[in-house]
Amino acid sequence: MISVYKWQRIKSMHTQGVSIRKIAKTLGISRNTVRKYLRDANPPQFKVREYKKQLDQYREDIQVMLDKGYIGTRIYNELAEKGYTGSLSSVHRFLREIKRDNQAVKSATTRVETGPGEQMQYDWKEWMLPVAGKKIKIYVHEVILSCSRKKYYQFTLSITTADIIRVLADSFIFFDGYAKELIMDNAKQMVITHRKDGIIRYNDEFLRFCGLYGIQPSACENYRPRTKGKAERPFYYIQEHLLRGLDVDNLDDFAVKLKKIQDEYNQRPHSKLGRTPEQMFQEEKPHLLKLPTIEPAMLQFKEARRVSNDGYISHDGNLYPVPMRYATKTVWIEIIYGRSMKIYDEKGTLLNKIYLCLEKQTTRPIHPEHEVINLQYRERKNGIRSTLVREFISTFGETGRIYLEGLRENTGANIYWHLTEILRYRNIYTTEKINKAMKECLKIGSYHKNSVKRLLEKNELAPLTLDYDPANLYLPDVKINRDLSCYALAESEVAN
C-alpha cells in the first residue's frame, strides 16, 4: 500500500497528461500499482494490525485478583498454574494497561443538569488572609443552587459542624428557600464514614439539621470532588478575583468585599448559559422549598461556662467579661462563625454579644463594671473615714482636733485604726479621762493609741454601768462533786 502523498501525486500527474510509465518511474513504483490506484477513486486506507495477546483470555481472572490486592508476582504464579506460558514482564505490562483503563473509567465524568429546586451544593475553602499585616486562617463557605448557579458566600474563623449548619441556614434565608437535595464533600463535620460500597454514616448533628428541613444529604464519592461540579470551579473565580493578593485592615472590611464579589458573580452572565444566575434564579425560585418554622434553639449550639468570682468566662484560652451579678454562676455561650460570641443566662436571655479575640491575650481585659465597683468602694471607704473623723472631733472637741493632726503627721495610713481604737476606750473609760490622757500625750508629743491606753491604766477604772437588773439575773445551779475542804492547805504548808 502506498502513502496518501503518492496517491495524490498519481492522480494529479495523470490529470496533467503524464504517462503511466513516467509516473511509475518518477514515484518509484510499478506501473501496475499506478493502474490500480487510477482505477480506484478512493484514497488508500491503512488497517491497524490486530494482535491477540495471550493474557487477553485471562483478563477477567486478572481483574478479580487485582480487586483482591494481589501483587504482580502473585498474579503471575496464579496464571502459570492456569496454563500461562508467557513472561513475568509481560504480566506487569498487562497489569499497567488494565490499571490505566480502570483509571480512565474512574476519571470519566458526565455532566448532569438538574431541574429547578432539585439540588444545591456546598463546599468550603481554607485560606490564609493577611489582616492588618498578620495572616489569619479563614474558611470561605459557598452554597450554590445547581440549576440557576446563584451562590451564597460566608466566611468563618473555625470549621465546626455548628459553623456549617449556621452557614447553610443563613444561605436558605438568602435564597428565601432551599433545594431538595444537598451535595457536599466528605468532611468529618458532616460525614463520619463513607465506605467504598457507598454506605454512608452522617454526623448526628448534621443529620438532625437535614431532618428539620427535610433535606436529602448526598456525599460525593471519596477523592472525587469533581462530582460536586458546580461548587468546585467557582472557588477558582473567588480565589483569583478576590483572595489572591488581598490584604485587609479588619474582618469587617473583608466581609464587605466578599458580599460585593458575591453580588457581582450573581449578576455576571454565565459563560455557557448566556444569562446571569440572578435571571435564572427568578425561574428557579418558585420551585424552592419554603422555609419551615424552626425553633431557633434547635439550630443553636450552646455550651455552659462558669463565671469566675471576678466576672470573667474563658473561651479558647482568652477571658471575656460578664455582668458581675453572674459571678460564680453558670451562663451559656454560643459561638457565631468563630468570630463573635453570644452569652445567655440560664433562662436563655441574651446578656451580651462580643467579638472574639483573634490573638491570645497577654493581659487580663478590663471589666467595665470593676471601675464602677471600685469607685463605689472608695467612696464608701472615704465616707466611713469622714464619719469617723467627725465623730472623733465631736467627741473630744479641740483636743481631739489637735491630736488628730498629730496622728496624720506621725502615723500615716494607720490614722483611722488609731482613731477607732481610742473611740473604743469609751467602753471602759469616761470621755473626760480619755480627753485628759490625750492632753498629756500632746505635752510629751506621743501620738499613738497605746500611749493613751497606758495613761488611762494608771488611773482607777471608772465603774461600769450595768444595763441589766441583778435581781432578774438567772444563774444555773452548779453541782459540786467534792467538799471544798480538800482545797485547804495543810498546817505544815501554812507554817512554811
Image (cartoon, helix red, strand yellow):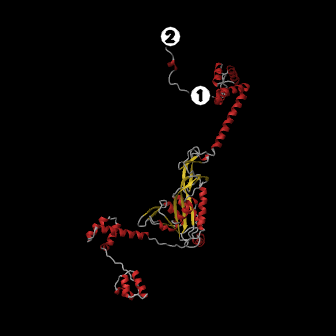
Q: Which mark is residue 495?
A: 2
Mark 2 neighbour class, 10 Å CA radius: few under 14, some 14 to 19, many 20 or more:
few
| Label 1 SS | loop
Which quadrant holds residue 72? bottom left
Please tell me which residue lies in front, 41 or 308.
41
SS label for mark 2: helix
- Horizontally, residue 169 falls left or right of residue 379, namely left
Task: Give the residue number, with chain letter if any, for mark 1.
Answer: 475
Image height of 1 relative to 393, above or below: below
Q: Callout 1: 10 Å neighbours few (<14), some, many (20+)? A: few
Foreground pick, 166 / 459:
166
Q: Indicate the position of residue 377 as horizontal and vertical percent values.
A: 65, 39
Mark 2 or mark 1, whichever is nearer to me: 2
- Quadrant of res 301: bottom right
| Residue sitting nearer the eye, 257 or 124 | 257
Q: Is residue 487 rendered to the left or right of residue 420?
A: left
Q: Quadrant of the N terminus?
A: bottom left
Picture coordinates of residue 299, whole percent (x, y): 55, 60
> How many numbered marks have been drawn onto this rendered protein structure?
2
Residue 299 sits above or below residue 7 on the image: above
Q: Is residue 173 visible?
A: no
Residue projecting furthest to the top: 495
Q: What kind of residue is marked 1?
A: Leu
* Marks 2 and 1, the one that precedes in the sequence: 1
Residue 14 position, x and y percent, is: 41, 87
* C-alpha distance separating marks 2 and 1: 38 Å
Task: Tell me, yes or no, if residue 134 can be seen here.
Answer: yes
Mark seen at residue 76: none
Image spot of residue 433 (x, y percent): 69, 22
